[in-house]
Image (tube, helix red, strand yellow):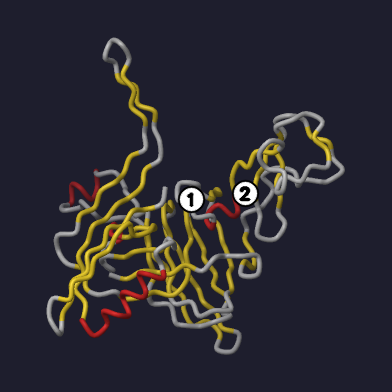
Amino acid sequence: MKLVRPEAVTDSIFQSSDVPENDHAEWLVGTTYADGDNVIVTTPNVHRIYESLISSNTGNDPVTDSGAIWKDISSTNRWKLFNGIVQEQTEQAGGMEYVLQSPNVINSMAFINVYAESITVEMEDAIEGVVYDETFDLVSTSGIQDWYAYFFEPVIRDTQLAILDLPPYANADITITFTDTGTTKCGALVMGQFADLGLSQHGATFSIIDYSVKTTDAQGRITITPGPFANRMDVDIVLDTAVYGSVLRTLTDLRTTPCVWVAETDNRSSIIYGYYREFDIMISNPTTSLCSLEIEGLV
């Protein structure tokens, strides 16, 4: 089991993108807005869309007056993949590109709720040049057992990807290119450093928590209102007793931090972006310990 401890992407880390930030007009202090008008605020580390809730709205800052005067709608399209809400996706027709640079060492990256044909990650150091350049195909081969399935089954794409072999560089330019002939989408782009908790065991269970609403009328007819869902995983991990203390500290420190959890590096379906609800560590013997984790994904 590996986890990616995320680093918050701020304006100082964000370098550039070909996704425009022009969802609506920028809010201006001297402009009067009508009830229902939308604006964006792109001041450092905000990048959000707001809707006016009153008429003759002049001089009210959407950030400080959000609530009765302005309604906070969402992040701007360019920044949705950094806001931690997995089912709010940044999208753009024909692919998209982001360039990030962190002052901290980055050795891992993950993409959650993504829709693209492929993703290319390039890392370039100011002194050593390009130190990493890999393209990852997201077309899934799951369920393709014969030639009939190869030709006639619908094309399915992996919606998660975790990259755990980035060379550990700080201040390197990381260019992420999403490629697709249609509309590319990404719910979360997470980068940071990974931690190895131990060896995931067979018997892990994966499920979803569905937040759709099902109502039944007086005639017994059921209406389903689609809603978001969250992934869920229960997994046992075997670890060396010698590292028990380190794993305990890591999990304790991350108790309020959503992370990317990778149960099996060769299985993209075992990737969840979320937090653990509960963990137990049992020291089985002087050499081996057992940890059980209950992980719930973000919506």
Q: Is residue 197 left or right of residue 252?
A: left
Does 56 appear above or below 242?
Answer: above
Q: Position of residue 293 (x, y in %)?
A: 26, 62
For label 1, the SS is: loop
Q: Nearer the viewer, residue 154 or 21?
A: 21
Q: Is residue 246 left or right of residue 167?
A: left
Q: Quadrant of residue 2?
A: bottom left
Determine which quarter of the picture holds residue 34: top right
Q: Residue at x 47, y 67 (%)?
A: 6
The amino acid pointed to by label 2 is Thr
Q: CA distance from mark 1 to mark 2?
A: 12 Å
Image side of residue 240 versus residue 49, left or right: left
- The count of marks equals 2
* Residue at x 43% of width, y 69% of height: 5
Q: Which mark is residue 85?
A: 1
Q: Which residue is mark 2?
A: 76
Task: Specify the amino acid type for callout 1.
Answer: Ile
Horizontal and vertical percent position of residue 18: 63, 58
